[in-house]
Amino acid sequence: MSMPHRPILVLQMLRMGDLVLSFPLFLWLSRMYPDHPIWVVAEPTFYKGLMPLSPHVTYFPWTATDQLKQHHYHLIVNLSHRIEAAKLCGMLEADEKIGPLEEKGGVHRIRGDWQLYRASIVQNNRHNRYHYADLNALDIIPQRIIAATRWSRPQRQVPSNRRFRVGVFIGASQPEKRPDIQFSASFIDALDKRGIHTVLFGGPGEKELGLSIQKATSARLVNMCGRLTLAELFKVGMEMDLFVTPDTGPMHVAAWAGIPVFNLSMGPVNPWETGPYQPGHYVLRAAVSCLGCWSCSVDGAFCRPHFQPEITASLIRRLLATDRHSIRFRSPGLKLFCSTRDTSGLYDLSPVGLPEDEASLRERIAQFWKAWFAEIFQVTTPVSSHVIFCDLAETHPRLMPVWRRQLLHLGALIRNGVATNASPPHNAFWKEFIPILRPLSGYIQLILENNDYSKDAWRKTLHLYAQLADVVHV
């Protein structure tokens, strides 16, 4: 009798949206390891309602530790940053482990280049262009499998003799990530004026908010806040022509279920990291330089006033009535994107109504770092980092002296570390550098911390520095 194949265990202790963004990994793991059972440890509050939509895996609550200890695993992937997850990952037996874990003596490590990169963008994600769903997988799943995946496009309703119906989800984990009552009411009025019927959605926590919005609007609407289970919400959602939502868990569930999503990307979120993952969904974001932040230091979020109810409703009416390729959207302070894939098969956002050559300096820098990290981790990239840097040098020559001075300063710090094997002067030295260099300085600091500032760690950072210097001719 043959021995059963060892399970693969994924630890996902975070919120609903994080669990849904792990669904692609579950799918790819089942394709790579068809004979290994896929087990997932998550919060029952979230996975119970999502099981009808989830790829075929076996879920366990976090209280099942004793049961989980009885097995030896082929692979453990920890996608959670919580201390409990690192402890569990460290205590279980496995052939291979990826992500944060606690070793004997309480020492914390992160295994996997991409998981270390992901940790390095905490509070430092200004120029990150890698989606969390891709980062979940890149240490484990070959790029060819990711690139070969064909996701279903959202299912658009084709109304005959009825008005367009738009679902508006009003909840979010933080108040600054969602529109306020005044915006929502004015937005619903503007939709109604354009012949679009609104259905208001929200969980039990949004029941009072829904009533406040309903009182503030003159339009007739259906208020379903707090009245539906998650499964019922998305059954009704499938009847909508568009699902308008901030960056929140139900947005990811809607995208996974094939409901067309229009994401109002406001507050401390980065749509390249947590936008709707499947292709064909829309993302509207403010055109301000601080976007992509980890947290907002401005009361109410600096980006939110750029979202105007009339402009947003007019844009939605045009998207419902025409093909996006015919849209020419230009509005001061706003940019519209459509979720897609780049030629390497990874998540991307394609601008709608803007020519490609209008990419901002910040976006060019972000694309440079996306290409450079892809190259050092041996992932195919559409354009080489050298080509992107040459374009930057040509179009923004005044940036180059500052860039090179900062690189020379970083190089001196690294060479001193190699020579003396000393730690940096403080544990946030990466912040000493200008924002355009922080993707590298943040990653270098994590390499050093993850390896106790060993000689080998300093040498590895020197090698990374030399690779970048070759690209930018320092």
Image (cartoon, rainbow, N blue to C red):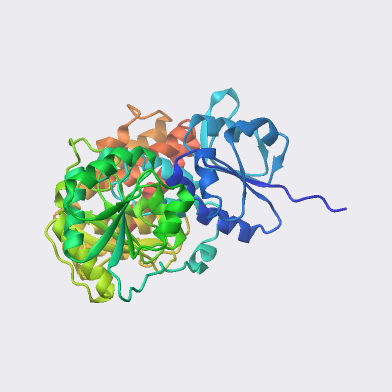
- Labels in figure, total: 0
> Which residue corresponds to the image point at 25% horizontal and 57% vertical from the top-left?
284
In the rendered image of this protein, does residue 80 appear above or below residue 158? above
Most extreme residue toward the right, as rendered?
1
Q: Residue 418 appears in which quarter of the rendering?
A: top left
Side (left or right) of 91 relative to 240: right
Residue at 13% x, 62% y is 331
213 w.r.t. 432: above or below: below
Q: Which residue is found at the position 41% from the left and 69% from the top?
A: 155
Which quadrant of the structure image shows residue 117?
top left
The x and y percentages for residue 229 are 46, 47
- In this orientation, does residue 5 appear? yes
Question: Where is residue 290 shown, x and y percent of the image?
Answer: 21, 46
Q: Residue furthest left?
A: 332
In this picture, residue 350 sits left or right of residue 148: left
Q: Position of residue 464 (x, y in %)?
A: 40, 48
Q: Is residue 472 visible?
A: no
Decide which of 15, 410 is in the foreground and name it: 15
Give the percent coordinates (x, y) of residue 153.
Answer: 42, 69
Which sits in the foreground, 396 or 137? Answer: 137
Front position in the image: 379 or 315: 315
